[in-house]
Image (cartoon, helix red, strand yellow):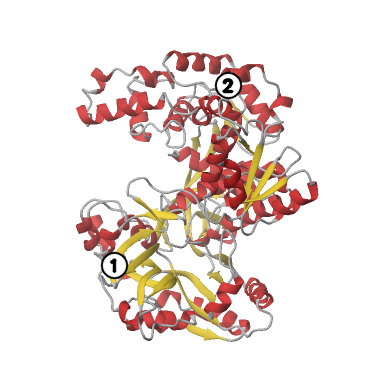
Amino acid sequence: MYTAQDEKRLFQQAKDLLQLQPTTAHIAQLREVINYADQRYYVADEPMLADVEYDQLFAALKKIELEHPELISIDSPTQRVASGISERLPTVAHLVPMLSLDNTYNAEDLRDWGKRCTGLVPDATIEFCVEPKYDGASISLIYENGQLLRAATRGDGISGEEITTNLRQIRSVPLSAPLIKSGVQQIEIRGEVVIHKNVFAELNRQRATDGLAPLANPRNAASGTLRMLDPNEVARRKLSAVLYHISDYTLDTNVSRPIELNTHFDSLQWLYNLGFPTPAKELKIFKDIEDVIQYCIDFEQYRDNLPYEVDGLVIKVNSIAQQEKMGMTAHHPRWAVAYKFKARQATSKLRNVEFQVGRTGAVTPVAKIDPVPIGGVIVSSISLFNEDVVREKDIHIGDTVLVERAGDVIPYIVKPLVELRDGTEQAIIFPTHCPVCNEILDKPTDEAVWRCINIACSAQVVERIMHYCSKDAMDIRGMGESNVNKFYERGFVKTIPELYHIDWATVATLEGFRDKSINNLQSAIEASKTQPLHRLIFGLGIRHVGETTAKNLARSVDHIKDFYNWDEERLMTLDDIGPKVAASVIHFFKTEENRHILEQLEQEGVNLVNLQQDQKQSGGEFSGKTFLFTGTLPTLKRSEAEAIAEAKGASILGGVSSKLNYLVVGEDAGSKLEKAKKLGSVTILSEAEFLTMMS
């Protein structure tokens, strides 16, 4: 699990990238930021980036990979629907992948989309169906023989969390429907779970009475409620549902007159007449994209009159036959698009600025403003990123500031209202010494942030321990922010290796620690010793080394200490590693204190060996051969196909190059296939040919 400081680092990194025109040198940063943004949005239900910012970063990454297909890696965000599924609830597969929608923000974007649709069906007239874009939690329902069989969250788009019991608590969702009369044996219906504004307000009033923190916004409240383990609490929260898409259905051919659904409009009207909660009364049909644009502009002024939150409109090609002809990319359907409304804004008073120290020593200024509601959320703290941003925007303590939640998500200060200054405002003075350890701060010439270079700084030490214990690193469940701080303050854990010889007898004397919680924590710490090498490398917190880079590093050695003898030139032969990352890795492994930590970890029994490489080398007939998978395979997930190849001794590359032996292609293979054809030395396989080869 990422720490609060990790979030600040990644958020600052995202903001820095948004101010640039990212190049190939930024590709690893783009991937790390986008992957984390996906995790926060789809798993934690706590979005990190505004939709418009996420879209810009995603578009930048796609542009770089299109121009440099050799840099495309198998785990790039562009190569999948989304990422992350919570492990709290059982996981089930969707009948049809739940893809994201491409976004537009202005009339020109909508016109361009309309032209693309026309180009895909040039000899046909297109009708557009427009409906609200509900700001809630996505769900997928399966009915079989008229009975609600299963409900699931969106998850990663391929699989989601099974939440059938909780969905049954939503009174607007039918437990059964006369589908069989229309000849429908099985149907998968997509929709959104929402909380009406008045219900949400009452829910927060009750929480305040009970001494609980208010819920952030209706979307997160709906998503969090769906994943509760107590169905009674779900029922008390009075959720509603809106079903807006039929993704798949199977007909009984023995029925004399089975239903025939030719348009999206007709399908939602049919569901509505059967008792399903659809936006049937709110659907609008247009034959001209200019009419769609005008409707979107007009509707935005009406959004606050609706009983539920919406953050835009969804425009779909009405004809289902045309939808099927247009198809979809790996990320979104070509026949649908979202028109996102403008961000919400408010003004507030900047009262103070606090300086927080992160795991890598970065000192981040955080503005403390008078609490102000923006888009259903109370905002009181806002990251100012770095000194350059503060100076560029000329922000002062005491200013009245314009605050925006772009995409209705992350707040930031747009600008100070200088015309309202009365002379009492004060300049923001950046510290020259660390606010935690009082060491002199340093600002590298190629960076925008001030850093504390004292690696013994307690703020950094605590953040490094939390990062080491996080889910994506060594996954030590129970060692979150609260316990790490508690153990550090009491002297139980002052360094990472000390996690492995905690005085549990003393821990047992602390309030809140009983036999069961201590046993669980001990088991998690012991289990971390057997984690694969790439998790350890990521957990060590080497600057600029994210999960993907950690995997590339781990694959290249037999033992982590092999890096003691590597130089920057050798490191840069690895995928996704440039001069900046290489220099950081060299510095880490040359530092005596870091070497001492590795010695201690090895003595404690932590795995420092690349066991996966040993298994692969002892594998088989494809040892020394390289594979790359592109496009959507007919039957296999990409991770499954890669595992089959690796089990036979093969290596997986991140892009097409002269080192590649085999390219396995599915639908929408794109630029990788074209580059492989130009090289001429790459053997191109279908999935069936690949499976035959592996067998």
Q: Is residue 239 above or below residue 591?
A: below
Residue under the point 55% across and 71% down: 336
Question: Quick check: can you spot residue 427?
Answer: no
Residue under the point 62% across and 20% down: 563
Q: Which residue type does callout 2 highlight?
A: Asp
* Distance CA(mark 2)–CA(mark 1): 52 Å
Q: Is residue 124 above or below residue 470?
A: below
Q: Which residue type does callout 1 highlight?
A: Leu
Helix, strand or loop under label 1:
strand
- Horizontal side of 310 relative to 393 (left or right) equals left
Instruction: Determine which quarter of the picture holds residue 565.
Output: top right
Labels 2 and 1: the sequence-earlier one = 1
Labelled disc at residue 148: 1
Q: Position of residue 481 (x, y in %)?
A: 38, 35
Question: Quick check: can you spot residue 85?
Answer: yes
- Horizontal side of 275 relative to 408 (left or right) equals left
Labelled disc at residue 558: 2
Q: In this view of the protein, which residue sits in the foreground, 141 or 136?
A: 141
